[in-house]
Amino acid sequence: MFLIDNSQGHAAYAEDALLVSRMNVNPGGKQARMRDGWFMEDGIKVLQAMVFSKDNPDYPNEPKGIKFVLSERGLYQSPLCGKCQSRCDLGATACCNKRILECQPDFQAQKSLVQETIEGAGHLCIFLPKFHCELNFIEFFWGKAKKYI
C-alpha cells in the first residue's frame, strides 16, 4: 500500500491519458495521441480508438478530436459550440461539446500517472486528503529532523 500526498506533481497524467483539455474540436492539428477510450452501448462496453486508422483517406493516423469522438458515440450536438470561450459553468454538463465528453465515464475514470503505475504493479494507492498536512507522515519526520538540527 502506498500513501501519496496531494502535491501538484502527483496529479500529473500520462502522455496518452484521456484528457479533453488536450484535444482539438476537429481532427488533426497539434493535439495529444490518446489511448483508446470506451463507452457503453446497449449494455455492451465498446472500445473506441482516439486516432484514425492509417487507412483513413482524410485523416490517416491523426487524432480524432472532440467532434468525431462524440459523433461515434452518438452524442455530438451541433447547436453547441466545441468549447466554451472561457471556462464551463460550475456544475454544467452540456454547455459545450467539450463538457459532454469530459462527463463520459472513460474520461472521468482517468487516473494520474502515479496512481496508474502503482496500481499497475498490483499495489494499492491511497491519496491523503488535500490541505491536511497533520495526516501526512512525512511532515512528522521533517518536524523531528528540524528539531534535531
Image (tube, rainbow, N blue to C red):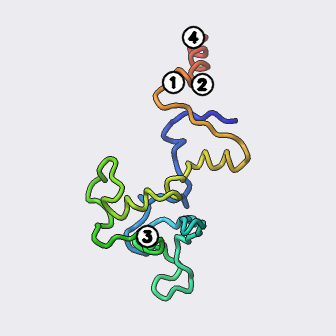
Judge the density around disc 4: few (<14), some (14-19), many (≥20) Cα neighbours within 10 Å.
few
Q: Which of marks 1 and 3 is nearer the N terminus?
A: 3
Local crowd at mark 1 within 10 Å, few (<14), some, or many (≥20)? some
Q: How far apart are marks 1 and 4 (CA)?
A: 17 Å
User: Which secondary structure lies at badge 3?
Assistant: helix
**Rendering coords of residue 13 (x, y %):** 53, 51
Q: Residue 133 carries which label?
A: 1
Q: Position of residue 148 (x, y in %)?
A: 61, 11
Decide: marks 2, 3 in contact (CB < 8 A)? no
Circle 2 crowding by C-alpha within 10 Å: few under 14, some 14–19, many from 20? few
| The N terminus - image quarter | top right
Measuring 52% from the left and 70% from the top, which residue is drawn there? 50
Q: In this view, does 5 lie above or below 76?
A: above
- Label 2 secondary element: helix
Answer whether labels 2 and 4 touch (C-beta < 8 Å). Answer: no
- The type of residue carrying mark 4 is Lys
Q: Is residue 115 left or right of residue 100?
A: right
Residue holding disc 3 = 70
Which residue is at the front of the view, 113 or 100?
100
> Where does label 4 land, which residue?
147
- What's under tag 3, amino acid-wise? Leu
Q: Do the residues labelled 2 and 1 touch (CB within 8 Å)?
A: no
Question: Which mark is on residue 138?
Answer: 2
The disc, 1 or 4, on the residue closer to the chain's N-terminal end is 1
Task: Please state if 86 lies on the left or on the right of 55 as rendered.
Answer: left
Query: Where 103 falls versus 134 (above or below)?
Result: below
Residue at point 60%, 24% (across, down): 138
Q: What element carries label 4?
A: helix
> Separation of disc 2 and disc 1 at Cα?
9 Å
